[in-house]
Image (cartoon, rainbow, N blue to C red):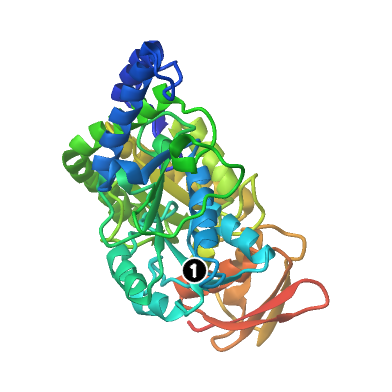
Amino acid sequence: MSYFDAASSAPLHPVARQALQASLDEGWADPARLYREGRRARLLLDAAREAAAEAVGCRPDELSFTSSGTRAVHSGIAGALAGRRRVGRHLVVSAVEHSSVLHAAAAHEADGGTVTEVGVDRAGAVDPEAYAGALRPDTALACLQSANHEVGTEQPVAEVASACRAAGVPLLVDAAQSLPWGPVDGDWSLLAASAHKWGGPAGTGLLVVRKGVRFAAQGPADERESGRAAGFENIPAVVAAAASLRAVRAEAAAEGARLRELTERIRARVPGLVPDVEVVGDPVRRLPHLVTFSCLYVDGETVLHELDRAGFSVSSGSSCTSSTLTPSHVLKAMGVLSEGNVRVSLPRGTQEAEVERFLEVLPGVVAGVREQLGAPVAAPPCAQSPASLVVDALGKRCPLPVIELAKVIGDVPVGGTVTVLADDEAARLDIPAWCEMREQEYVGERPADHGTAYVVRRSS
């Protein structure tokens, strides 16, 4: 079995396992107590904080350990917004932030605050000038991930941080995906990360608040972790998290170069092995271990199940998964194909032979799913075609509306139109993406009696 979903959660690093087992015997006491066992626990906690701070590039007293990366994000956003409430209640985020950031933004908006969402290009990156343009005199906080969780695109954090600094606005960086590969550049103000992303134990995160940043911790007061993370510290998990972060950093250069070669192989070869595939994300400014691609005419959930049966654990940002019936907000913001999305994120130690076997298995899996769904193999011939057609795809879920469109596009002459009636939200993203991939003209959409009418003009 090949586990290719490290972006969701990396396997426990051997150093983390060793540190966890060792600290279970030494770190069980209350580090706030003055007796011997408490002092021993405090030494372990302080050493872990210093090691983590060195890896992040901050002072130890700026770093607090939290119960998760999500908790770090929520505490960081809430505390920064509360600390700068006199400035205003405006929050700026990018359209491709992790759901934890977007959920915090939604809660802020529901509480009467305002939120500006900065869009991204087709590679998934924000434009620093556009981001700077979203900052206002009443902006209390800005948020930007260091690298995207779904497509691996690295964001221009240093440039955005500079713009935020010039505007007097603190920038919170979600560094969960990138921190194992190196510190975050730029003059950022707050940072959040999660240990299970780099091979540390789950349920451990970290929050950094730079000195001088106005911050008011929310919730009941607690004397632990500078008041930013309530509750008794999980010292064995914290020690394991810090030890594993130091270990992955030590091997990051060599392992990153090796994994980048493997993901570059996937990026280069998948379009030749599988017809009608779009590889998404920035091809250069990206995380070394992550590659994402989307396949036309494919049910994403079925592809994941078939790959699992073949021995590969991968993830998906597709709208066609059991957990969601709406397109991935990241793929939607990028304007790329969402159906049949496959995210491959390689853990440390992945072997070349595993990637080669994945490339051997993938074409058959996709072809089999397309056959099950009745996807077109080739465009049908055109002869005495009607000028326009209407396809009723109401009640059909992704990718069936696009499959129905592809089946009939050849039945209209060049310049003719096909109108697809659909009520699946994914069609709003996937039909324009299909048009771009197949070089057809997407005319637009309009409300219909039921659902939405999507109009496509045949260009070739």
Q: Residue at x 17, y 43 (%)?
A: 253
Q: Which residue in the protein does label 1 denote? A: 140
Q: Position of residue 448 (x, y in %)?
A: 78, 78
Determine whether, in the image, residue 319 is placed left or right of residue 422.
left
Q: Position of residue 4 (x, y in %)?
A: 40, 37
Q: Give above or below for 424 relative to 439.
A: above
The amino acid at mark 1 is: Ala
- Tag 1's secondary structure? strand
Residue 421: quadrant of the picture = bottom right
Q: Give above or below for 294 relative to 118.
A: above
Q: Nearer the viewer, residue 259 or 114?
A: 114
Q: Residue at x 51, y 72 (%)?
A: 87
Q: Residue at x 36, y 56 (%)?
A: 147
| Identity of the residue furthest to the left in this view | 254
Q: Nearer the viewer, residue 308 or 131?
A: 131
Q: Nearer the viewer, residue 59 or 115?
A: 59
Whether residue 251 is visible, yes or no, is: no
Determine whether, in the image, residue 51 is placed left or right of residue 137.
left
Disc 1 crowd rating (10 Å Cα; few below 14, some 14-19, many 20+) is many
Q: Position of residue 423 (x, y in %)?
A: 74, 66
> Which quadrant of the rendered structure holds the N terminus?
top left
Q: Position of residue 299 (x, y in %)?
A: 59, 51
Determine whether, in the image, residue 207 is placed left or right of residue 456.
left
